[in-house]
Image (cartoon, rainbow, N blue to C red):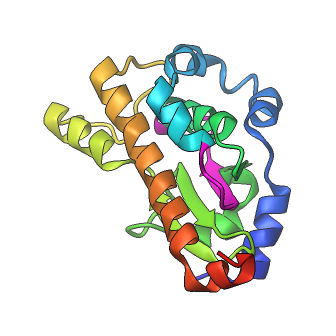
Amino acid sequence: MLDAATWKRAHAEGVAWDRYLAIHAARTAGWTSHLAAARLTEPQRSLLSGFTRRMNVLVLTGAWCGDCAVQCPMLGAIAAACPAADVRFLEQQDHMELAERLRINGGTRVPTVAWCAEDFECCAILGDRTLARYRAMAARQLGASCPLPGAPVPPDEAAATMQGWIDEFERVQLMLRLSPRLRQVHGD
């Protein structure tokens, strides 16, 4: 597991969602349909905006990756709706040392999301797909492990994938709110 100083350094090197898109505009052109589809419902927006404990979130991504094209716009929408979450994006190709240290099932997966407390103690890492996304892929029995960035995603799969990411943000927020260590720090 990485120490808090390493997470803090990596987070500082990351960029906000809009900046990530601007930096990688040429390679994210195929993401357009997914950007438009990454919409939160009002209950989701309300839940996320009600979070109070700061979370530092790092998304290791790849502008070339089909799964990133589908899921990173969702993470960008979550970041915009959740002021308590400081979500930063890092291009995997530019941070291979970090990617190597975050291997999942022997591979450098993207997107990989790490949630840290306000002091950069790691709380959770989720790599490359939510359970809903894996279930949908298994049902279709796709041959390729990484669909093209512009490949359509059924609306029910997109909604379930978005909810999976929101559930993980909520799980970490509750972990942080109930943490004896952080409750002592905040006097709550």
The quarter of the image holding the N terminus is: bottom right
Q: Position of residue 93 (x, y in %)?
A: 69, 51
For the image shown, how many numbered marks are present on the structure?
Answer: 0
Q: Is residue 59 magenta?
A: yes
Quarter assignment of residue 94: bottom right
Can residue 127 be seen?
no
Residue at 25% x, 37% y is: 137
Q: Work out which residue is located at the far front of the displayed protein and give it.
A: 188
Compared with 50, 73 (above or below) is above
Compared across the picture, whether 166 is left or right of 32 comes to left
Q: Above or below — where is 97 with respect to 166?
A: below
Residue at (67%, 85%) from the top-left corner?
184
Q: x, y (%) of residue 36?
A: 56, 14
Residue name at image x 54 percent, y 35 percent: 46
Left or right, 23 with respect to 45, comes to right
Image quarter in which the C terminus is found:
bottom right
Instruction: Give residue 58's quadrant in the image.
Output: bottom right
Does the stretch in magenta take in 165? no
Q: Nearer the viewer, residue 55 or 8?
A: 55
Q: Does the rendering let one see residue 122?
A: yes
Query: 98 or 38, which is in the foreground?
Result: 38
- 116 or 2: nearer the eye? 116
Q: Position of residue 168 (x, y in %)?
A: 45, 54
Vertical comparison of 152 with 40: above or below: above
Residue 63 percent coordinates (x, y): 64, 36
Residue 38 lies left or right of residue 89; in this view the side is left
- Residue drawn at (33%, 19%), measured in percent from left and top? 155
Magenta residues (range): 50-67
Image quadrant of residue 105?
bottom left
